[in-house]
Image (cartoon, rainbow, N blue to C red):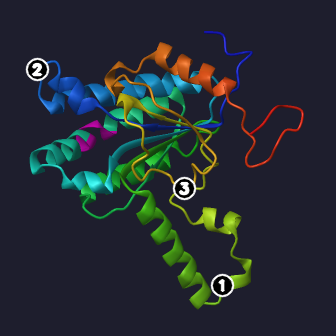
Amino acid sequence: MDYSNLKIPTHVGFIVDGNGRWALERGLNRSKGHEEGFQNVKKITSYVFSKGIKYISAYLFSTENFKRSKKEVDFLMNLLTGKLKEILKFCHDEKIKAVFSGRKENLSNKVLKAMKNIEEETSIYEGRVFNICFNYGSHTEIVDATKKISEKVKDGEINIEDIDEKLFSKYLYQPLPPVDLMIRTSGEMRISNFMLWQCSYAEFYFPKCYFPDFNYDEFDKAIIEYTKRDRRFGGIDYGKKSS
């Protein structure tokens, strides 16, 4: 689809949802759905970046997901461990800078070392940033940022009077611009503790399809809808009718 007459968001967020249900409705194990979802993350990421979007954040595993069955959690951890080399190759092929957002607790040293290696090796790329959110929760991100700032204040490196939104943003997991368009697949209409700070003025789009079925056409529909939105950021365009 031609994007030349459409609004292009700078930062798109994805809440990757519906992998397990996609599999169960096909008589498959939930693990098969997660595998399909991972493969689709790569396809959609490549397509989205090709349309001029500069930042993508993908919510792959939340801090709350540890409440799921041990079998499913173990599978997801093993899936990530097994796919880290594949992620690195993908980022090199697409010339994407990859970063990871989330807490390090409950992740093995092997995984943490591989994540660090991916970030270091892909740091040479500019213009495309893929923010992989794993063991992530927005509440914990905000709490962790607050703790970091508090330590700086205690050590005399920051004055309380200097704390504002711009400074606070620098202490989040990654120094990324605000999310413009947030997409959650599967039809669920909630954001489940994802990038609450960054989504303060985001446009939300909730397609009914499960993530493994979220294809190029589905993303095009999201951009068409985004183009129709009137983003005023709390202000009013007096040249238009407004509520």
C-alpha span from label 3 to label 1: 20 Å
The residue labelled by disc 3 is 174
C-alpha span from label 2 to label 3: 39 Å
The region drawn magenta spans 80-84
Q: Earlier in the sequence, mark 2 or mark 1?
A: 2
The residue tagged with tag 3: helix, strand or loop? loop
Q: 127 or 120, which is in the foreground?
A: 127
Task: Count residues near mark 3 (Cα–Cα under 10 Å), then give few for <14, some for 14-19, many for 20+.
Answer: some
Q: Is residue 143 magenta?
A: no
Mark 2 and mark 3 residues within 8 Å of each other at the beta carbon:
no
The residue labelled by disc 1 is 157
* Vertical comparison of 185 with 197: above or below: above
Mark 2 and mark 1 residues within 8 Å of each other at the beta carbon:
no
**Which residue is found at the position 26% from the left and 60% from the top?**
109
x, y percentage for residue 140? 41, 65
Q: Amino acid at mark 1?
A: Glu
Q: Quadrant of the C terminus?
A: top right
The residue labelled by disc 2 is 27
Q: Earlier in the sequence, mark 3 or mark 1?
A: 1
Q: Amino acid at mark 3?
A: Gln
Q: Quadrant of residue 125?
A: top right
Q: Is residue 34 visible?
A: no
